[in-house]
Image (spheres, rainbow, N blue to C red):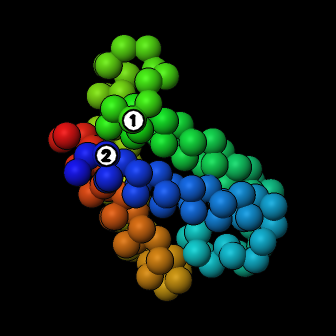
Amino acid sequence: MTEAAAVIACAVLAGLAVFQAALAAGAPLGRFAWGGAHDVLPPRLRAGSAVAVVLYVLFAVIILETAGLITVLPGDALGRVGIWAITVYFFLGAALNAVSRSKAERAVMTPTALALGVLCLIVALG
């Protein structure tokens, strides 16, 4: 169960990474992110989307490491603390997306963040 949750979480993160990369490149999808105020993100939010891509890769490494599917991090402590931090991050993200002014962001990103929070919780408890 832990391994499956990790793989599913990483697949969702890969999709989000592609989405954030598209936002960083200027795709008119801003209604789904960053409060939904811009179709095409301004430069500072594009930079934020680029940072999100990097974070999602790091999150995936921590998730896979904690699930025992890869071994790249030094020691267990980083993965154990990291998975709990990521779990909290996604649950907080779900709450913040749920109160977004953007209907599109609420509809798409709230359940996505909630699902990632649950998947990461499964990995953390595994």
Residue at 81% over, 61% down: 25
Q: Is residue 3 left or right of residue 51?
A: left
Identify the residue shown where x is 31% and y is 53%: 5
Give residue 78's quadrant in the image: top left
Label placed on residue 109: none
**Where's residue 105, x and y in %?**
51, 76
State the separation of the CA atoms marked 2 and 1. 7 Å
Q: Secondary structure at mark 1?
A: loop
Q: Position of residue 14 (x, y in %)?
A: 57, 56
**Residue receiving disc 1:** 69
On the picture, is 34 further left or further right than 99? right
Q: Quadrant of residue 81?
A: top left
Q: Amino acid at mark 2?
A: Glu
State the residue lying farthest toward the top: 75
Name which residue lies at 24% across and 40% down. Answer: 124
Give the x, y percent position of residue 18. Answer: 66, 60
**Left-right relation of 98 to 47:** left
> Observer-nearest residue: 103 or 63?
63
Query: Is residue 65 visible to us here?
Result: yes
In screen coordinates, is 113 left or right of 105? Answer: left
- Which residue is denoted by mark 2 in the rendering? 3
Q: Give percent across and percent down for residue 60.
A: 48, 42
Task: Characterize the local packing of mark 2: few (<14), some (14-19) or many (20 or more) Cα atoms within 10 angstroms.
Answer: some
Return the residue found at the far left. 125
Eyeballing the image, is 90 above or below 22?
A: above
Q: Secondary structure at mark 2?
A: helix
Whether residues under marks 2 and 1 lie with C-beta atoms below 8 angstroms apart, the answer is yes
Give the amino acid at mark 1.
Leu
Quadrant in which the C terminus appears: top left
Could you tell which of marks 2 and 1 lies nearer the N-terminus? 2
At 49% from the left and 57% from the top, the residue drawn is 11
